[in-house]
Image: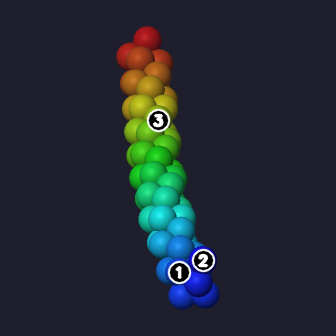
Amino acid sequence: MSHLDKLLEIEKRRKVLQNAREEILGKLISEREQRSQWLIKLIDIDDELEELSRQSKALT
């Protein structure tokens, strides 16, 4: 295998690995964003439950 062939092989493998890395990072970012959205929804639900509890106590 010539020096040029080896360099081309290395470059090809590097591109494959970079693409895989970018794909994984993209998935991690979207999962993190999804978890953040779930946490925000959970906080909103907790806030509403507290408000309903206050309203219920005020009526009794």
Helix, strand or loop at disc 2?
Answer: loop
Tell me which amino acid carries mark 3: Leu
The residue that appears at 49% across and 59% down in the rendered structure is 20
Identify the image's colour scheme: rainbow, by chain, secondary structure or one colour.
rainbow
Query: In terms of sequence position, does the residue under pointer 1 or pointer 3 come before the other?
Result: 1
**In the image shown, does 15 or 47 lie closer to the viewer?**
15
Query: In terms of sequence position, does the residue under pointer 2 or pointer 3 come before the other?
Result: 2
Q: Quadrant of the C terminus?
A: top left
Q: Nearer the viewer, mark 1 or mark 3?
A: 1
Q: List the single residue furthest toward the front.
A: 1
What residue is shown with label 2? 1
What residue is shown with label 1? 5
The residue that appears at 50% across and 55% down in the rendered structure is 24
The residue that appears at 40% across and 24% down in the rendered structure is 52
Label pair 1/2, CB-CB below 8 angstroms: yes
Q: From the viewer's perspective, is residue 12 above or below residue 56?
A: below
Label pair 2/3, CB-CB below 8 angstroms: no
- Estimate the spatial distance between the alpha carbons at disc 1 and disc 3, rounded to whole Å: 55 Å
Tell me which amino acid carries mark 1: Asp
Pinpoint residue 53: horizontal percent, then vertical percent.
Answer: 46, 22
Q: Is residue 21 visible?
A: yes
